[in-house]
């Protein structure tokens, strides 16, 4: 029988919870560089590619061959800036969570194939291993109602936080600081979620929503398979 959420219903303009973990639950991020490379790949795919500028750079006689090779790689790289709206993420040592809206029914599948293949090639080369890095094909849950839409970001961001006295601090890479205004990454788009919360009343803020205690019953079906 196929694993839960391995059979995917792809729809135009659909919102999805995407997640995957390492094969045999092994670590997929071993150090800070691994996290940074994964995030760099996300920005490469999600930020608009200025092909005109890149081609102009190629004609610069002062560029080294290595710099030109880098530009050529960027020109060949797939780009999903017009296909994917990236709402939230969290990277954990042995798995990741992404919240994505796709424009066409094939956008997420192409994006995830590009991201997973590229990161696996990097990871295997760096850590001198071969074979699959991820447990299987990524899982995808279609978001179908408003509560699921909001509580999904809460679930994702909770993964990255831990208690520090009476407050929570981030211990894993995530988009939480993009939501609280402490960081700005142009490829992360929090505005649609934040429009449900107050910018002036702390009790009704997104930060309060995430950091309050609850039992997560409303998002049970969003939790990663064990």
Image: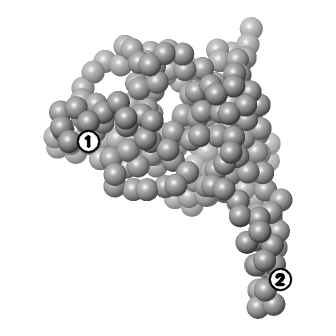
| Residue annotated with mark 2 | 59
Residue 125, x across and y down, in percent: 75, 58
- Badge 2 marks a residue whose secondary structure is loop
- Can I make out residue 67 in this image? yes
- Can I make out residue 34 in this image? no
Give the vertical position of 126 relative to 132 (above or below). below
Give the vertical position of 18 relative to 94 (above or below). above
219 to the left or right of 213: right
Instruction: Using a 10 Å C-alpha cutoff, classify the residue at mark 2 as few (fewer than 14 neighbours), some (14 to 19) or many (20 or more).
Output: few
Quarter containing the C terminus: top right
Residue 45, x across and y down, in percent: 68, 51
Judge by depth and name the residue closer to the eye, 167 or 93: 167
- Badge 1 marks a residue whose secondary structure is loop
Outermost residue toward the bottom in this view:
62
Judge by depth and name the residue closer to the eye, 60 or 6: 60
Image point (18%, 33%), residue name = 203
Image point (37%, 49%), residue name = 177
Image point (35%, 30%), residue name = 196
| Residue annotated with mark 1 | 199
Residue 128, x across and y down, in percent: 74, 56
Colour mapping: one colour
């Amino acid at each position: 029988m196929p694993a839960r959420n391995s059979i995917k219903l792809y729809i135009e303009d659909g919102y999805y919870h995407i997640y995957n973990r390492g094969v045999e639950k092994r670590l997929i991020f071993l150090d800070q560089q691994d996290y940074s490379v994964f995030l760099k790949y996300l920005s490469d795919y999600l930020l608009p590619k200025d092909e005109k500028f890149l081609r102009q750079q190629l004609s610069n006689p002062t560029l080294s061959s290595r710099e030109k090779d880098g530009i050529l790689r960027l020109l060949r790289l797939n780009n999903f800036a017009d296909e994917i709206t990236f709402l939230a993420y969290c990277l954990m040592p042995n798995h990741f969570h992404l919240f994505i809206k796709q424009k066409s029914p094939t956008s997420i599948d192409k994006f995830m194939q590009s991201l997973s293949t590229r990161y696996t090639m990097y990871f295997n080369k760096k850590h001198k291993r071969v074979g699959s890095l991820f447990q299987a094909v990524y899982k995808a849950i279609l978001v179908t109602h408003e509560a699921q839409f909001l509580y999904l970001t809460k679930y994702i961001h909770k993964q990255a936080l831990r208690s520090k006295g009476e407050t929570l601090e981030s211990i894993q890479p995530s988009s939480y600081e993009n939501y609280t205004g402490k960081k700005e990454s142009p490829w992360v788009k929090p505005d649609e979620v934040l429009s449900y919360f107050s910018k002036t009343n702390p009790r009704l803020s997104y930060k309060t929503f995430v950091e309050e205690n609850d039992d997560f019953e409303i998002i049970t079906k969003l939790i990663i398979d064990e």
